[in-house]
Image (tube, rainbow, N blue to C red):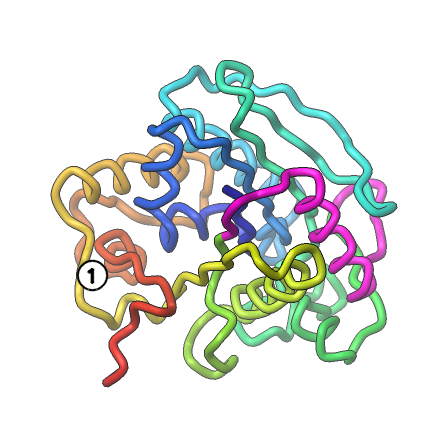
């Protein structure tokens, strides 16, 4: 199973418990993080988020938080690959493009550029927050995503919501990454099913995760949250914030009530 999301933690909030169930069942699992989720912060922040998401995956897989990291080249771009040592069928890829902000207007640190602007042709390239920085055109990004698919050869692909418009209250990166994933998948093998998952707007939908799955989902987010200083959430006690609402919800786009 291949999962492609915008930021480290999108998979924990919006795709779990599906991801955790796969990991616990021993399904080969690869996740790609297209942006660093830097939120305009310095590099220490996105590096901490990467450590947090790795710790969360190790917890879900029931393995020690020990990873083998390597720099791998896909379609001419260098990605960071992390493989869970105790369960090598679990892999993470980090592209480290800049977070584009909610509306796609970017952050000063990345010259106010974003994935949305790149795909819409408003900027010719997007530079990673990695060192050394790499430039991605829209075609480069599609080539990398389809190259990962060629390497992984998934039988199923999960991503975020690419069906609704950018004004629905979701993050601009969520929609853009989902659209890119669908395009890359169609280029690679259109017969492989792609499932989209609702992001921020899922908080407005009825709760549909409970019992053991909710407890496990909250525990996984707690592991990640120790590393993310901007995530102020107590998954057990907090019942007000959107993050708390996301914990009790998991909606594929095809499952959203049509009356919404």
Q: Which residue: 46% across, 42% down? A: 228
Q: Position of residue 7 (x, y in %)?
A: 54, 52
Residue 170: x and y in percent read 44, 71
Residue hosting label 1:
240
At x 39%, y 46%, the residue is 12
Q: State whether residue 251 is above or below residue 73.
A: below
Q: Position of residue 244 (x, y in %)?
A: 25, 55
- Write the start and end of the magenta stretch as one range: 130-157
Q: Quadrant of the C terminus?
A: bottom left
Above or below residue 178? Residue 92 is: above
Question: Does the stretch in magenta take in 147?
Answer: yes
The location of residue 166, given as percent across then percent down, is 52, 80
Is 64 magenta? The answer is no
Judging depth in this view, the residue of 183 and 178 nearest the camera is: 183
Q: How many marks?
A: 1
**Relative height, residue 57 to residue 8 (above, below):** above
Q: Is residue 215 left or right of residue 39?
A: left
Secondary element at image label 1: loop
> Image point 55% across, 54% down: which residue?
192
């Amino acid at each position: 199973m291949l999962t492609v999301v915008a930021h480290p933690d999108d998979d924990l909030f919006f795709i779990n418990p599906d991801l955790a169930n796969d990991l616990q069942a021993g399904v080969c699992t690869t996740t790609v993080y297209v942006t660093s989720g830097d939120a305009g912060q310095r590099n220490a922040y996105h590096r901490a988020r990467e450590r947090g998401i790795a710790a969360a995956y190790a917890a879900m897989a029931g393995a020690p938080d020990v990873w083998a990291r390597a720099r791998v080249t896909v379609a001419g771009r260098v990605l960071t690959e992390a493989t869970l040592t105790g369960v090598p069928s679990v892999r993470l890829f980090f592209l480290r493009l800049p977070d584009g902000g909610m509306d796609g207007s970017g952050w000063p640190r990345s010259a106010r550029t974003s994935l949305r602007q790149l795909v819409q042709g408003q900027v010719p390239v997007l530079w990673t927050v990695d060192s050394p920085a790499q430039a991605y055109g829209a075609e480069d990004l599609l080539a990398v995503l389809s190259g990962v698919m060629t390497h992984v050869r998934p039988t199923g692909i999960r991503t975020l919501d690419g069906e609704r418009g950018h004004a629905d209250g979701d993050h601009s990166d969520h929609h853009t990454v989902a659209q890119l994933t669908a395009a890359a998948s169609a280029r690679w093998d259109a017969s492989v099913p792609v499932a989209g998952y609702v992001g921020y707007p899922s908080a407005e939908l009825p709760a549909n995760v409970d019992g053991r799955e909710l407890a496990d989902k909250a525990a996984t987010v707690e592991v990640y949250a120790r590393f993310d200083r901007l995530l102020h959430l107590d998954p057990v006690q907090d019942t007000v914030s959107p993050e708390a609402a996301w914990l009790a919800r998991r909606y594929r786009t095809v499952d959203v009530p049509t009356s919404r």
